């Protein structure tokens, strides 16, 4: 009698475990990545040319690039930059951008830059890598929003 009760208990336990195992649904919850928002006025905090830091060798204090929500940008105080006049910009992918394209309005000139958008010490940064006409001069500018 004890053996029958024990066997029935084992059967019921196994049956319950099987039911529990097959009744669990795994549901993958996808949280969409928000588009990267670069609108605002940005200033250079670090400038590197051909691997050498030139931040203190050149006055970048007055340079600003203002990325507007309508897809345009405005530059202040010309410096060696990927473009030299105001125009429009686009990101290759709004959620996972790897490249930014600048189109000058007045000249029709277009240029692209590799694009990074990290958070460093709690602040969003932009990192642009580009050449200014001469392929032997490579620049990397790190910008933060004002």
Image (cartoon, rainbow, N blue to C red):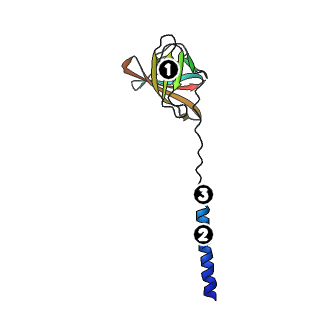
Tell me which residue sits at (59%, 52%) in the image.
27
* Of the pair 61 and 139, the residue shown nearer to us: 139
Which structural element holds mark 1? strand
Q: CA distance from mark 1 to mark 2?
A: 61 Å
Residue 106 x, y percent position in the rendering: 51, 10
Crowding around mark 2 (Cα neighbors within 10 Å: few <14, some 14 to 19, many 20+) is few
Tell me which residue sits at (60%, 82%) in the image.
7
Residue 92 x, y percent position in the rendering: 50, 29
Tell me which residue sits at (58%, 68%) in the image.
18
Which structural element holds mark 2? helix
Residue 21 x, y percent position in the rendering: 58, 64
Q: CA distance from mark 1 to mark 3?
A: 48 Å
N-terminal of the pair, mark 2 or mark 3, is: 2
The tag on residue 68 is none
Tell me which residue sits at (57%, 21%) in the image.
71
Q: Quadrant of the C terminus?
A: top right
The tag on residue 25 is 3
The tag on residue 17 is 2
Residue 41 x, y percent position in the rendering: 59, 21
Would you name the residue on which mark 1 appears?
102
């Amino acid at each position: 009698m004890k053996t029958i009760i024990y066997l029935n208990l084992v059967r019921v336990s196994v049956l319950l475990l099987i039911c529990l195992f097959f009744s669990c649904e795994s549901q993958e919850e996808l949280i969409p990545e928000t588009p990267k928002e670069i609108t605002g006025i940005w200033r250079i905090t670090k400038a590197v040319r051909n691997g050498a830091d030139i931040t203190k060798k050149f006055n970048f204090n007055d340079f600003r690039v203002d990325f507007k929500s309508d897809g345009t940008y405005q530059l202040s105080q010309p410096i060696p930059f990927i473009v030299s006049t105001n125009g429009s910009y686009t990101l290759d992918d709004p959620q996972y951008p790897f490249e930014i394209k600048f189109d000058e309005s007045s000249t029709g000139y277009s240029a692209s830059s590799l694009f990074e958008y990290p958070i460093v010490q709690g602040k969003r940064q932009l990192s642009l890598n580009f050449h200014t006409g001469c392929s032997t001069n490579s620049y990397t500018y790190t910008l933060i929003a004002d």
